[in-house]
Image (cartoon, rainbow, N blue to C red):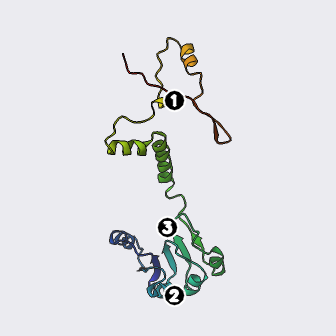
Amino acid sequence: MAKKILFAPNQPDVILTMVKSMTPAGFELVVADPGTPEFIQAAGDAEYYLGLARRMGGEFFRSAPNLKLVQLLSAGYDHVDIEAARKAKVPVSNNGGANALAVAEHTIMLILAVLKRVVQFHNSVAAGKWRVGNPADVAVLDATSPRQAVAELREPVAVFKRGKRTVTRRRTELHPPS
């Protein structure tokens, strides 16, 4: 008799086809949505759970007496009652770190988007306003020496103390070329 893997929740066909193709020989993949009668019935026979946690507490573990492992596809396990899993003697394994690179890239992308005001400029361009923004963001100095450049930049750009702005500089005026 094949060992049963309960897979939940149901996924689009393209994902289910991939998951089924990776199911090892001697195992049967049973797909069901949590909370449905099919899920409760499949849990009764399942030895393994693979998927995302949805209210996985004492009731779930009592309905799955043959369960040997819960393998989550997510890093988070906050929807799993760990104490109920301990009582049922079922280890719970998460997928922590699997998306760490993507999260790091996304973080850098968001930092750059805020720094470069991507949303503001996108909205301006979409509204047909091409020349917007704060010209004080870029200072071009016509200085003859580093000392003169530093002297021209003597006012602080911004000063913060305990996370609160304590200095506001004057807004830069642009003078059209003569």
Q: How many marks?
A: 3
Residue 133 position by quadrant? top left
**Mark 1 or mark 3, earlier in chain:** 3
Which kind of residue does numbered mark 1 sit on? Arg
**Of circles 1 and 3, which is in front?**
1
The residue sitting at 48% across, 43% down in the picture is: 114
Q: Which part of the image, by quadrant, shows the N terminus?
A: bottom left
Spatial CA distance of label 1 from label 3 is: 51 Å
The residue sitting at 48% across, 31% down in the picture is: 137
Which kind of residue does numbered mark 3 sit on? Leu
Binning the other alpha carbons within 10 Å of mark 3 as few (below 14), some (14 to 19) or many (20 upward) gives some
Q: Position of residue 73 (x, y in %)?
A: 49, 67
Q: Position of residue 100 (x, y in %)?
A: 51, 54
Spatial CA distance of label 2 from label 3 is: 21 Å
User: CB of mark 2 within 8 Å of CB of mark 3?
Assistant: no
**Of circles 2 and 1, which is in front?**
1
**Mark 2 or mark 1, earlier in chain:** 2
User: CB of mark 2 within 8 Å of CB of mark 1?
Assistant: no
Can you tell which mark lies on residue 171? Answer: 1
Which residue, given by chain and number where applicable, does mark 3 sit on?
73
Q: Position of residue 86 (x, y in %)?
A: 65, 77
**Mark 2 or mark 3, earlier in chain:** 2
Binning the other alpha carbons within 10 Å of mark 1 as few (below 14), some (14 to 19) or many (20 upward) gives few
Whether 98 is drawn above or below 86: the answer is above
Which residue, given by chain and number where applicable, does mark 2 sit on?
44
The residue sitting at 64% across, 79% down in the picture is: 84
The residue sitting at 57% across, 72% down in the picture is: 79
